[in-house]
Image: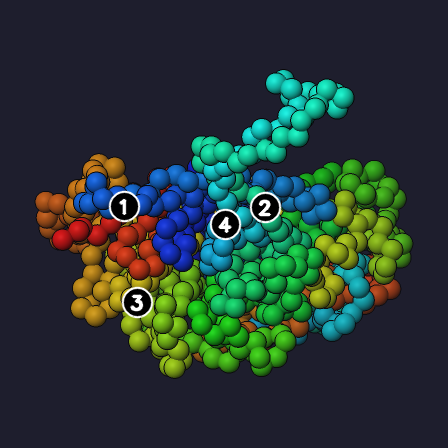
Amino acid sequence: MELKKTRADIISTVEFNHTGELLATGDKGGRVVIFQREQESKNQVHRRGEYNVYSTFQSHEPEFDYLKSLEIEEKINKIRWLPQQNAAYFLLSTNDKTVKLWKVSERDKRPEGYNLKDEEGRLRDPATITTLRVPVLRPMDLMVEATPRRVFANAHTYHINSISVNSDYETYMSADDLRINLWNFEITNQSFNIVDIKPANMEELTEVITAAEFHPHHCNTFVYSSSKGTIRLCDMRASALCDRHTKFFEEPEDPSNRSFFSEIISSISDVKFSHSGRYIMTRDYLTVKVWDLNMENRPIETYQVHDYLRSKLCSLYENDCIFDKFECVWNGSDSVIMTGSYNNFFRMFDRNTKRDVTLEASRENSKPRAILKPRKVCVGGKRRKDEISVDSLDFSKKILHTAWHPSENIIAVAATNNLYIFQDKVN
Amino acid sequence: MEFKLEAHRIVSISLGKIYNSRVQRGGIKLHKNLLVSLVLRSARQVYLSDPCPGLYLAGPAGSPAAPPQQPGEPAAGPPAGWGEPPPPAACVAWPETEPQPERPADPAPPRVGAAEPAAPVTGAGDALRAGEMEEAEAAWRRVEGPREAAEGGAGVFAGAEGPRGARRHCGCPPGGEDRPGALGACPRVDCRCAPRPAEDEPPAPPAVGPRKRGAAGVGGGPAGGPAPGSSPLKKPRRNSEEQPGGAEEEEEMETGNVANLISIFGSSFSGLLRKSPGGGREEAEGEESGPEAAEPGQICCDKPVLRDINPWSTAIVAF
């Protein structure tokens, strides 16, 4: 049995905040790194705001559940931002078991002028103090501090795979393999269980929850995807326990594609509402699908991400790649969708023009301000000069996590332990 | 034929994954194990249904639909699956010493039949039996682990092997076994442990052992009974903790014995076996509920000797 050594700095989640000013990443070591876009200055008109490290903190530590004799990984599974309501920023970060609300705030002034302590910091004898000095706030180097404001723990028996902030900004949900809980940000010692698909007899288990998200505008609506390739839309007004869905999205299986691995590749790894709230996008192993909320029996669009892998499923099963959970994202206008692949490739699909492009995130190909060259995978026959054959793809270089700026064409792509930020060419 | 070989290979790989999943950091991943179990089932179906002479394949091809399970999972049964009968595999592995009558009608005769012919045929018959025994034992040993541990993914307990020396036929662990929390003497209060005639073979793996049914569970392991606050479980975990432990022993078995494993495991895929073509949720099958089917107060020795071992289902049931 071989142990895979995973590096603690492998990025496990990427997320822009609502304005795009901040970009947060979480890694396997439980750390969160936040980047901030620098303000564009008049002096450097052509230098679009770049992202620099703004704050770094340890969000989760490895834990050991003594009751279950089980180690809890510190890996950050998801980060979700709250909309900004004051000078501070708030985000939720979660590992397999615990969700935390972090406050990230700046401090650029410090009070000075206390005369109660001497220069070495020892308290002075009150008898020697003859004057009252009111401390004055003086500027200091900017310090960004992150403090955990809430810890939402002990509500999940299984591994948390998703968190989603509700549009009411007062509640959020956390989903694990079998249950979804609804929380109020102010209350950490209880949560409402709103979905529970655990069968009475675990041997009857046939599917698990793989992702969940609230509707962007309707605070009563959310969706969750399953390992069987289905999506359920639920309305919390219907009942307290949303075990019965309001809508059920499923595409009939294509019998010609049946194989040992049909079920695995139909498992949905990510589900995202469009910004408009009209569509949902799902990612399974080989495709990305767009569904119209008003049509449950099949998606309105299906995009092949890397269909050339279909004949390699057995090898991908052996090396565990078939279990990779790719995410997918919408651009700000819902016209383009993006998702990752192997060999550090990522794909973009333009829903309107039906054009797609494959790009690569790698140091060799990405000098600053260089233009990304479209890549192509050669499926068979003669390989052209700059094409890559399927067999030379590096399956250890996978892009699972990507993010798209909410309003501009700026994307963040996590390639193992590197974060790439690409911006659309100006002019 | 190629399909069969392919299926065979996939089964081996899948079992290896289940085995390895136990030692992964962060506990057993339910989702991944579920998917692996689906592959295992598909491969098994192909393997069993592809007619191919010369392979020591168990009984009737395409393992019959699992018979309705015996006592099955009482809906709101006793709080424990404790007192589960010893898994059948061990018994299955010893066809000549396993008098059929000991079994209640339910457990699929075909399953037994399946395993029986297999044993003599394989070259490594004895090794096979021993291996199956071990895995059965391992699975059962796991049953003693804390519920929540299984819930979260049997970490420590997954490891199983303990003294495999003489065990009482009823499956109770021999005295002095060094499992955490295990009691010395036959832990099952109601186990008569009377020597069973004509049974010389390694006794069935220990039953749930130290845990008593009912409230005051003597801790079968570090976790003792389910800790009330620790998990939002709604129902007691009766199907106990057939953890993926079964798989750990399989790793040591040669893949040539996989066929037998399939026939043994086959019946374990209760919920998965009957996947309807439409892909809807599977029906709840009562069968294969394995240990938890025990009625309270049932004496282990009376339990059907041939019970389906569900070491496989433990992988996903582990929680």
Image position of A363 (left or right of B223): left
Question: Which is more toward the observer, A123 or B193?
Answer: A123
- Quadrant housing residue A134: top right
Q: CA distance from mark 4 to mark 3?
A: 29 Å
Label 4 lies in what chain?
Answer: A
Residue A183 in view in this figure: yes
Residue at (61% x, 79% y) in the render:
A239
Give the crowd class for mark 1: few <14, some 14-19, many >=20 residues within 10 Å: few
Q: Is residue A385 left or right of residue B284?
A: left
Chain that bears disc 1: A
Circle 3 or circle 1, nearest the eye = 1
Q: Which residue is mark 2?
A: A148
Marks 3, 2: nearer the viewer: 2
- Give the vertical position of B103 relative to B211 (above or below): below
Q: Which residue is mark 1?
A: A40
In the depicted view, which residue is nearer to us: A84 or A411?
A84
**CB under 8 Å between discs 3 and 2:** no
Whether pointer 1 and pointer 4 mark residues with C-beta atoms closer than 8 Å, the reply is no
